[in-house]
Amino acid sequence: MKKSILTIAAAMLLTTLPVQAADSVHFLPIEVALNDNNAKARLGDEIKFYFGDQPTPEIARRLGSDKTSQKTNAFGKAFETSCNWVFLSAMMRLQTRAKELGADAVVNIVSNYKNVERSSRTEFECHEGAIMSGVALKADFVKLK
């Protein structure tokens, strides 16, 4: 009997499949994220941000495009908390790049997770795993008239 139990246990150990980490996709409101973590104050008003096909003032000059993919610790946090935090990190990265290029606006901001674009004026895409949350954005940098 003892040998049978050990044989069954050994067989179960040898046939187990690797465990995959959870990857949940969330579409969260941009406005809520911009009102969390003191985001509006952190981003300031020097650089203007326009999401998806949101109308913009007239553009004087296009200065380039870029993408950013940011991650943050999600362990033990509500997905909204970690997603809003990592969204702010991605926005701050776009802001930094805009300043480097001499832009005064970031336009056509779209989610770009794993290079799959999703355009929205109102939502961003966040992927939440067991220990990390991630937001990837793509945008154009411009000088407004």
Image (cartoon, rainbow, N blue to C red):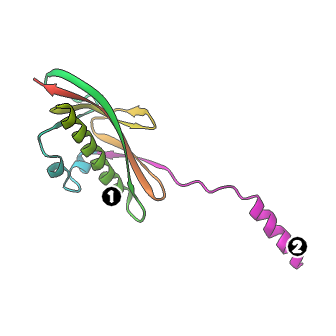
**Residue type at numbered disc 2:** Ser
Q: How many marks?
A: 2
Residue pointed to by mark 2: 4
Spot occupied by residue 105 in the image (x, y as percentages of width and height):
18, 32
Q: Residue at x 77, y 60 (%)?
A: 14
Mark 2 to mark 1 CA distance (whole Å): 49 Å
The disc placed on residue 22 is none
Helix, strand, or loop for circle 1? helix
In the rendering, at what x and y percent does residue 67 appear?
A: 34, 35
Q: Quadrant of residue 66?
A: top left
Front residue of this view, candidates 101 and 21: 101
Q: Which residue lies furthest to the bottom in this view?
A: 2
- Would residue 18 be found to the left or right of residue 64 on screen? right
User: Between 127 and 28, which is closer to the camera in this rendering?
Assistant: 127
Q: Residue at x 76, y 58 (%)?
A: 15
Q: SS of the residue at dot 2?
A: helix
Please give the range of residues in magenta: 1-29
Q: Which residue is drawn at 48% across and 58% down?
A: 130
Is any part of residue 33 visible from this angle? yes
Question: Does the segment drawn in magenta span residue 11?
Answer: yes
Residue 72 drawn at (x, y percent)? 37, 54
Kindly identify which residue carries mark 1: 81
